[in-house]
Amino acid sequence: MSSLRADPPTSKIHPEAEETTSCLCSSSKIDHFDRLPDSLLLFVFNKIGDVKALGRCCVVSRRFHSLVPQVDNVVVRVDCVISDDDTSSSSSIKSHSSSSSSSSSGFSSIFRLVFGGISKPFQALTQLLGPKVNSRNGNGPSLSVATDDDMELDQAAVTHHSPTQVLKNFNEIRFLRIELPSGELGIDDGILLKWRADFGSTLDNCVILGAASVITNNKIARVMQQENAAAADDDDNGSIPESFYTNGGLKLRVVWTISSLIAASARHYLLQPIIADHKTLDSLVLGDADGQGVLCMNREQLEELRVKPLSASSASKRTLVPALNMRLWYAPHLELPDGVVLKGATLVAIRPSEQAASKKDVSDISWVSSTFEEPYGTAAKMLVKRRTYCLEMNSF
């Protein structure tokens, strides 16, 4: 009897599996970012903007590390107020924060270091609210652009860098925005205070919008409207009521104005080293997370500061505020189209006395109406239609 014997297999059932695996292995070794042109990567980096995120991108690869310094749109969000190591007149804000248990006094000390020129009558302004400090080492969060060397640091250690230091490796910045952790001016809850200032080598213009209270509830707003109807009727088409002078209303507006100008001039002073280091800048904005104040400089103003150094105040590290012409508009009760009511609404437009006389038409107020975003832009447009009051202020 013959026996049946199976032939040994001479081929694999799925020979294509090995080929597929081989292809996958070879494709996994391809860095697909290498296929992207530098221009596209720079476009993405410019959309990122945030200097901390860009710092992390720097350590991804050598290519990223070489491209990030070419970014032209950068945003620096300051975690705490710090300064350069040098003690020259161009030094930035300095912070020696204590532990979180003494954060209140610590932030007051920071404010005094930054805005030391604020005299005793304005001690109410000596608070700078910021994030809680790290209780392990007394330092706030790091503000730095990461490098390969930074990655070797102990994770428990936190290193402070000023915006000047953070930006030193960026070579082609055109648009720079720096954001402080909060506004400098400590104001009571419910009070509205916003300002915007444009600077060259000195103040070009400043607009301040304030209100004693902001009412957003429609029902309360209607009650307030009824209570102020008589006062509005006797308003004499925008005239300031006599009570404004006797109940401290005018004094409060003067404090708002001087405080805002001091904050703006201090910010301007601290930008000197950044402006000197980055000659490619087209726009520089220094704001705060609260939206309280914004300092703006365009290319022409930046170049003016490089050519004509600023005049510093003898009392503190801030730019000298020149003699000013001011125009003030006031409304005891201002209801905006969206139902928001500003009680004691005040708008102040400020220009240096020399500029007001020589460069601009005194009747031109279009720049005032377009200063703020909505709904406060509408408030400004409504206020400039009221009676105008002119004031003057000496240099300080």
Image (cartoon, rainbow, N blue to C red):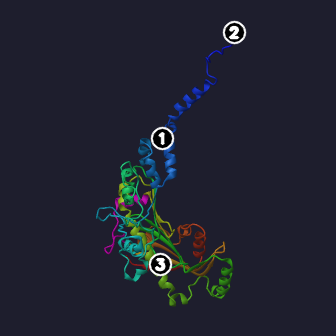
Say whether residue 37 is magenta.
no
Q: Which residues are magenta?
A: 300-320
333 left or right of 59? right
The image quadrant that residue 358 belongs to is bottom left
Residue type pointed to by label 1: Asp
Question: Residue 310 bears which disc, if any?
Answer: none
Quarter occupied by the N terminus:
top right
Which residue is drawn at the image coordinates 47% and 65% (left, top)? 287
State the CA–CA distance, disc 2 to disc 1: 75 Å
Question: Residue 77 location in percent, x, y?
Answer: 46, 61
* Badge 3: residue crowd in 10 Å (few <14, some 14–19, many ≥20): many
Q: Residue furthest front?
A: 1
Q: Give whichever of 368, 358 is nearer the camera.
A: 368
Q: Give whichever of 188, 324 is nearer the camera.
A: 188
Closer to the N terminus: mark 3 or mark 1?
A: 1
The residue pinned by badge 3 equals 256
Regarding mark 2 in the picture, which secondary structure is present there?
loop
Does residue 246 lie above or below 202 as drawn?
Answer: below
State the CA–CA distance, disc 3 to disc 1: 49 Å
Q: Residue furthest left?
A: 87
- Visible residue check, residue 207: yes
The residue pinned by badge 1 equals 38
Closer to the N terminus: mark 2 or mark 1?
A: 2
Q: Give whichever of 195, 62 is nearer the camera.
A: 62
The residue pinned by badge 2 equals 2
* Badge 2: residue crowd in 10 Å (few <14, some 14–19, many ≥20): few
Residue type pointed to by label 2: Ser
The image quadrant that residue 103 belongs to is bottom left
Quarter occupied by the C terminus:
bottom left
Q: Nearer the viewer, mark 3 or mark 1?
A: 1
Does residue 103 lie above or below 244 as drawn?
Answer: above
Say whether residue 304 is magenta.
yes
